[in-house]
Amino acid sequence: MAVRDISLDHSLPDNLDAERFVLGAVMSSETAFLQVAGTLTADDFSLEKHKRIFLRMSELHERGEKIDRVTLANELMKAGQLQSVDGLSYLVSLDDGLPQLVNLDSYVAIVKEKALLRRIIAVSQDTINRCLTCEEEPAQILGAVEDAFMKLGEVQSRNSLSSPAQIIEEYEGGINAFLDTSKRIKGISTGYLKFDEMTGGLREGELIILAARPAMGKTALALNIAQHVATNHQNPKAVAVFSLEMSKESLLTRMLCSAARVDQQRFRAGYLNADERQQLREAMVELVEAPLFLDDTAGTNLMDVHSKLRRLQAENELGLVVIDYLQLMQGRGRFENRVQEISSLSRGLKLMSKELRVPFLVLSQLSRAPESRTGDHRPMLSDLRESGSIEQDADMVAFIFREEVYRPDKESLKGIAELILAKQRNGPTGRLKLAFLNRYTKFENMAADTGEDSPGFE
């Protein structure tokens, strides 16, 4: 059965009255152009003559000249466009019956909304045409579509300038919450006291990069944080973990053994005593009841992640997204090199975190530079592999460093890890120590941070 093309029955979305009122308002008020120009561009108008009129208005404003019927008609005449906009009589008609200027923001919003609808239609039509011609690979077309729609969303999400009064009015909890640090909304706790103290927790809309050399424990730390967020008895939140390297079963095994404090090797080999089996059962009950969601789809891309998170967020209070790891994600479309592709992915993840208002904990590889340095092997921001814009897009960059990996013969270093906070937009940088229980692939607070007895290193 043929699908009817409804585009044949409809013209492109527009609101000519709103466009006329906006242009008429600019000619009637000396301050109206400033109110309009911060939001609209010439391309937001649907009629070609309205685009030309707005462009000429812009040129008059840039030269500091007054915008009215006479100056605008003269400007159009010099450009040879007066007749193409239906002459002076049309300019005169623009402010005939003009409503009150207090409604100008509403008319601007209408023009902007119709322009966005036309752009969505244009992208969709271009996609249909490319699919019908079959001149490109489907993955290439999908990449172009993903990029085009994300750019539309980025433009749409740009907010206008806000006054302090507007910011406080929109702030959850109002002025009292804004001024009282004890009442201000805090980020999501990671379970690591010193880290939460330095960062205030993981905050919505932030892109957090956790990087380390292989075998340092970046997956273990990310899973420990995810597990803490999902099983927090005071305020559990849904966590989505996208693993591009490990299977869902392996992830669950790690989390289970970590929570139960059972040796993974003994678990896999089946050499467990009664106490360990009981610990595993209790840990499994907690995990089964937690709002924890795992995805091990190979070759995941931004569009896959976005669509899955949208569905998850509609049903749960999404608190954290973990991606393990950035360099295994696939970018859609063509890139000149790998650095450009990784830069596109990091930028896309940052935009997604802002749109969904959820912190993204993204794992990343490091280059071999730390190993080639003599003396101090601690990683630096320049060690981010195929860094491109990773450092630029990230709100926070943290590195895991375990000196025992480089000096295995020194007993005093065993079980001690450093978390290096190398970048933080809204807070301090520095180092903090964590205990690493290798048998359980588990990071814990140091005893000195909790005031409790040492967990012991085995």
Image (tube, rainbow, N blue to C red):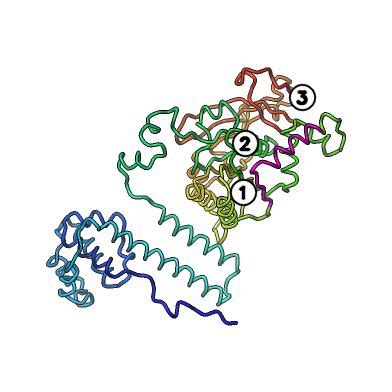
Image: 68 above or below 281: below
> Where's residue 318, x and y in %?
56, 45
Please, what secondary structure does the residue beneath circle 1 have? helix
Circle number at residue 458 = 3
- In space, the residues marked 2 and 1 are separated at their CA atoms by 21 Å
Q: Compare marks 3 and 2 and give the one earlier in the sequence.
A: 2
Name the residue carrying label 1: 327
- Left or right relative to 333: residue 447: right
Q: Is residue 318 above or below residue 97?
A: above
Task: Characterize the local packing of mark 3: few (<14), some (14-19) or many (20 or more) Cα atoms within 10 angstroms.
Answer: few
Quarter of the figure that contains the N terminus: bottom right
Tell me whether the residue at label 2 lies in contact with that at label 1, contact meaning CB atoms closer than 8 angstroms.
Answer: no
Q: Nearer the viewer, residue 241 or 166?
A: 166
The chief SS type of the magenta part is: helix
Contact (Cβ within 8 Å) of mark 3 with mark 1:
no
Give the label, 2 or 1, closer to the camera. 2
